Amino acid sequence: MNWGLIGIVALVVFPGCGYTETEWKAQLAKTNQLTSQLEAAKATQRQTQVELDAAQSRVSDLEEDLKRLGYNLNNVTAELQQTDTERDQLASSVNQLKRALDEFKLRAEQLDRIKQRFEMLRDKLTQLTQLGLKVEVRNNRMVIRLPGDVLFPSGSDELKLGGIKVLGAVAEVIRKDPQLSKRYFQVAGHTDNVPLEGGPFRDNWGLSLMRARRVLLYLIAPVDSPEGGGGLDVLRLHAAGYGEFDPVQSNSNGNQRETNRRVELVIMPDVEEMLDLRQLI
């Protein structure tokens, strides 16, 4: 019950309380003006909430699309959920709701850019899958998987002729594409879990690293060199050996161990594809 309004009415009815009718009319007009302003603010708040809900729904749809593409946003989502909780506690005015709406619109635009860049990169690499190579997302990075048994003889880091042909085709795709040629790549060597006994590499760590090195050396060699090469920018590639410790299968049988013997070209994340970290500080 609005006791303030009842009090005003009562005092108007009983002017003997010390206030003139003119004074009470002015007070009543002021009350009506404040009531109108309050109703307008409530209407604005309701409209802003509708827009905020729509923006949140758009963000959810974009996150689901990126998850289906293999892009992992769990960490960012957890941070946003924490921010949402804090925002909900503070969202008691129209201005706070408008700020929240602006943030979600920015988030939706950022996710749109991530999705577009991700799909563009995947489409550019489609022709490699036609060569029998596997293009996939692992550990939140896009990876071109090169079968180790195609590239190298068992226990060796000398490239086979078939391996050279495959690497030449991969390098040509990267070299001739303006966007791909500007990306950074990690050449990652991997082995199965069968211990390496003797030889120049001593263990699977050494074998995986030297195979990655051999692939890198071919990729950065000039195309017109005597032994051929990929012609890629030496400053945009680096090599790493993971030994047996990053398998894609369980190593429980011969076929799975063969899959684990591989060299991967890992496309390093581009800062422009990520969320603007300054918005999260």
Image (spheres, grey):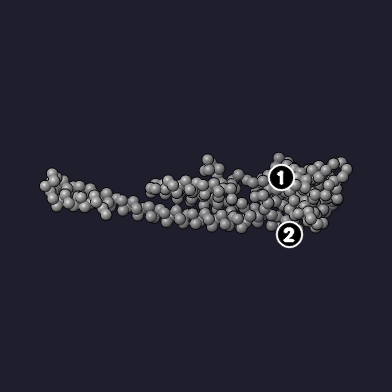
- How far from the left and from the top, in percent, is residue 231? 75, 45
For this view, does 23 lie left or right of residue 149? left
For this view, does 53 lie left or right of residue 115? left
What residue would you read off at disc 2? 130
Query: For the residue carrying disc 1, how many other residues have a C-alpha within 10 Å: few (<14), some (14-19), or many (20+)?
Result: some
| Quadrant housing residue 259 | bottom right
Instruction: Please state, as top left, top right, bottom left or bottom right, where the N terminus lies in the image.
Output: bottom left
Tell me the amino acid under the disc marked 1. Gln
What residue would you read off at disc 1? 186
- How far from the left and from the top, in percent, is residue 89? 44, 47
Q: Secondary structure at mark 1?
A: strand
Mark before the other along the chain sequence, 2 or 1: 2
Tag 2–tag 1 contact (CB < 8 Å)? no
Q: Secondary structure at mark 2?
A: loop
Tell me the amino acid under the disc marked 2. Gln
Residue depicted at 67% across the width and 49% down the height: 139
Query: For the residue carrying disc 2, how many other residues have a C-alpha within 10 Å: few (<14), some (14-19), or many (20+)?
Result: few
Q: Count of labels shown?
A: 2
